[in-house]
Image (spheres, rainbow, N blue to C red):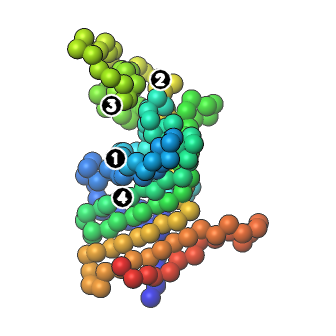
């Protein structure tokens, strides 16, 4: 049985799933106190050359505090056209307004005005009062400091495809060796 490299599988799946709703993923991680959490994010970019998944988040959110204590996470991405599920496990990297973060600015520019305005209000999870929350009428032209990229370069990918019989499932694991011995290993496993 021939097993395709997972980056090619994801790129092909994304080319077949073009609806904006196909960009929702679930991120499972631990809170700062070690409790399991899961939330839905919008996947903003797939960078195949770097095998990097890129979403955005608010630096003031609870998930950021948890990821600073426990940076490991798992992203689950369901792509419906061929009934494919990708589960990516790895370390989550948060990238803010560091020099050279042109990707951050590019993603900010691509956000809808309403999405940008979400980063100008109260911190996520804070209590709301009955008084109206002041918000900017128009979004800022440049990303505020609390707008950060949430990135993962997976070390393990569990791929499941359910549109054919028998169903197919492959596990890809990155083995860190010394020097040139770093590589992906793939094996077919039972669905």
Spatial separation of the CA atoms under disc 3 and disc 1 = 15 Å
Q: How many marks?
A: 4
| Tag 4 residue | 77
Quick check: 102 left or right of 130? right
Name above or below for residue 75 compared with residue 160: above
Q: Position of residue 70 (x, y in %)?
A: 55, 47
Indicate the secondary structure of the residue bearing disc 3.
Answer: helix
Q: Earlier in the sequence, mark 2 or mark 3?
A: 3
Indicate the secondary structure of the residue bearing disc 4.
Answer: strand
Task: For the N terminus, give its image quadrant.
Answer: bottom left
Decide: few, some or many residues near mark 2? Use Cα within 10 Å; few <14, some 14-19, many ≥20.
some
Indicate the secondary structure of the residue bearing disc 2.
Answer: loop
| Tag 3 residue | 115
Decide: few, some or many residues near mark 1? Use Cα within 10 Å; few <14, some 14-19, many ≥20.
few
Spatial separation of the CA atoms under disc 3 and disc 4 = 21 Å
Q: Which residue is found at the position 29% from the left and 53% from the top?
A: 22
Q: Is residue 166 visible?
A: yes
Decide: few, some or many residues near mark 3? Use Cα within 10 Å; few <14, some 14-19, many ≥20.
few
Q: Which residue is found at the position 56% from the left and 29% from the top?
A: 97
| Tag 1 residue | 40
Spatial separation of the CA atoms under disc 4 and disc 1 = 10 Å
| Tag 2 residue | 144
Quick check: 87 left or right of 187? left
Q: Quadrant of residue 176?
A: bottom right
Quick check: 156 left or right of 182? left
């Amino acid at each position: 049985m021939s097993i395709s490299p997972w980056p090619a599988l994801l790129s092909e799946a994304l080319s077949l799933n073009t609806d904006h709703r196909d960009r929702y993923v679930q991120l499972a991680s631990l809170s700062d106190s070690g409790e399991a959490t899961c939330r839905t994010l919008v996947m903003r970019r797939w960078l195949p050359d770097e095998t990097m998944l890129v979403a955005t988040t608010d630096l003031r959110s609870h998930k950021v505090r948890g990821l600073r204590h426990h940076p490991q996470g798992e992203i689950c991405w369901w792509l419906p056209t061929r009934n494919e599920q990708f589960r990516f496990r790895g370390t989550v990297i948060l990238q803010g307004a560091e020099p050279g973060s042109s990707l951050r600015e590019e993603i900010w520019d691509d956000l809808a005005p309403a999405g940008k305005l979400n980063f100008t209000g109260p911190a996520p999870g804070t209590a709301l009062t009955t008084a109206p929350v002041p918000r900017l009428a128009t979004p800022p032209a440049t990303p505020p400091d609390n707008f950060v990229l949430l990135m993962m370069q997976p070390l393990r990918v569990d791929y499941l495809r359910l549109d054919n019989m028998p169903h197919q499932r492959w596990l890809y694991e990155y083995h860190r060796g010394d020097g040139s011995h770093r590589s992906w290993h793939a094996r077919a496993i039972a669905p």
